[in-house]
Amino acid sequence: MKQRQKSRSDSGQSRHTWSYYSLEQKLNYKLALKGLKLIKRPAPYTSVRFV
């Protein structure tokens, strides 16, 4: 059981080491398989919530 939990945490850790470009390329690939397109937004104010 401990070994299984360790492998899950290791795989989660590897996602945090991806570069932004690599993540974007993976998303574009997966979305293209489903016929969808990635819409990029400019960084400023992306974390602001409007009510």
Image (cartoon, grey):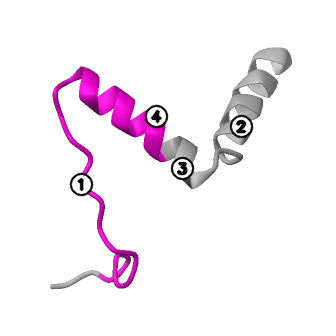
The image position of residue 39, as x and y in percent, is 24, 54
Q: What element carries label 4?
A: helix
Q: Nearer the viewer, residue 14 or 18?
A: 18
Measured Cα–Cα span from mark 1 to mark 4: 14 Å
Quadrant in which residue 30 is drawn: top left
The residue identified by callout 2 is: 14
Residue bounds of the magenta highlight: 24-48
Q: Which amino acid does label 2 sit on?
A: Ser
Measured Cα–Cα span from mark 3 to mark 1: 14 Å
- Rendered view: 37 above or below 3: below
Q: In which quadrant is the C terminus drawn?
A: bottom left
Q: Which amino acid does label 1 sit on?
A: Ile
The residue identified by callout 1 is: 39
Among the two numbered marks 1 and 4 on one chain, the one whose residue lies closer to the N terminus: 4
Q: Which of 9 and 18 is in front in this view?
A: 18
Circle 4 packing at 10 Å, graded few (<14), some (14-19), many (20+), is few
Among the two numbered marks 2 and 4 on one chain, the one whose residue lies closer to the N terminus: 2
Q: Which amino acid does label 4 sit on?
A: Lys
Q: Is mark 2 on a helix, strand or loop?
A: helix
* Magenta residue check for 37: yes
Q: Which amino acid does label 3 sit on?
A: Tyr
Q: In front: mark 2 or mark 1?
A: 1
Q: Is mark 3 on a helix, strand or loop?
A: helix
Q: In this view, does 37 lie to the left or right of 27?
A: left
Q: Is residue 32 left or right of residue 23?
A: left
Measured Cα–Cα span from mark 2 to mark 4: 14 Å
Q: How many marks?
A: 4
Among the two numbered marks 3 and 4 on one chain, the one whose residue lies closer to the N terminus: 3
* Magenta residue check for 40: yes
The residue identified by callout 3 is: 21
The residue identified by callout 4 is: 26
Measured Cα–Cα span from mark 2 to mark 1: 25 Å
